[in-house]
Image: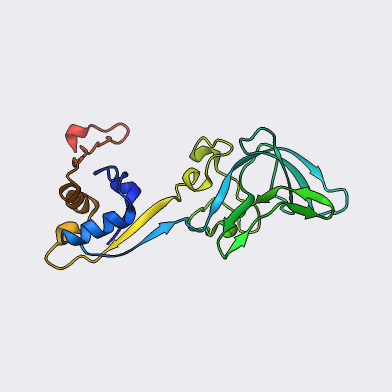
Amino acid sequence: MKLPLNWLQDFCDVSDIDPKAYCDAMTDTGSKVEGYEVLGEDVQHVVVGKILNIEKHPDADKLQICSVDVGGEKPLQIVTGAQNVFIGAEVPVALSGAKLPGGITIKTGKLRGVVSEGMLCSIAELGLTLHDMPYAIEDGILILNSEAGDYQPGADIKKALGCSDVVVEFEITPNRPDCLCMIGLAREASVTFKKPLKLHTPVVNAAAGGNINDM
């Protein structure tokens, strides 16, 4: 059973407890933890950026110079070879000093003589796939879906995409089928940490034109 801690907060708030302490305490009280994974741990200093302007690179036909708002005092200048970017697009920006999957570090440098103060990222460069972001394209920069949320320049990309989480893997024994669900493990956490258990009343929406009393 894999348990995302962000989801657990809906039923039992353990946000003030370190993931390792959570795992140790749950094991000690009978809910054995096999291990846990910190999602997005290898993505650091990548933020939401908004493209303000695009110019052609003076010495390279396939490169473009983007002015990008990342929530700072002034926009960053970033050179990219991607052809799917446009003015107004909200994109992931790896700042100078950023860490990406595979041990990659981004630094300010020059591309064909023009300073580039970071890098615009694709889904692959963030360690994501089309399974994670079905609306993305594989051979270009990830354009954030404006319908999915209100993105703020400078916001941590992991939080903006909902990729910042800890997933705990439990070994559920045959005599504890009640723990094969979120509420079951939330009950265990509630008892272990002496925190309130929050259960939610299901809301049923009748189909258009139907009467819920007839269901």
**Residue placed at 61% from the left, 58% from the top?**
138
The residue at the point 68 percent across, 49 percent down is: 118
Snapshot colouring: rainbow
- Residue 26 image offset from top left, x and y in percent: 21, 57
Residue farthest toward the right in the current orientation of the protein: 59
- Kindly indicate the quadrant of the structure image that contains residue 2: bottom left
- Image quadrant occupied by the C terminus: top left
Relative height, residue 55 to residue 168 (above, below):
above
Would residue 102 appear left or right of 115 to someone viewing this image? left
Between residue 37 and residue 122, name the one nearer to us: 37
Query: Residue 62 location, x and y as percent?
Result: 80, 54
Q: Is residue 180 visible?
A: no
Q: Is residue 27 left or right of residue 175?
A: right
Residue shown at 83% from the left, 48% from the top? 57
| Residue sitting farthest toward the left | 175
Is 215 or 163 nearer to us in this picture? 163
Residue 76 in sight from this viewpoint? yes
Residue 70 on image: x %, y %: 62, 39
Out of 89 and 95, give the one closest to the viewer.
Answer: 95
Q: Residue at x 51, y 58 (%)?
A: 42
> Residue 180 location, x and y as percent?
21, 59
> From the image, which quarter does the N terminus lie in?
bottom left
Q: In this image, 201 relative to 70: left or right?
A: left
> How many numbered dots are placed on residues in this image?
0
Task: Please say if 145 is above or below 59.
Answer: above
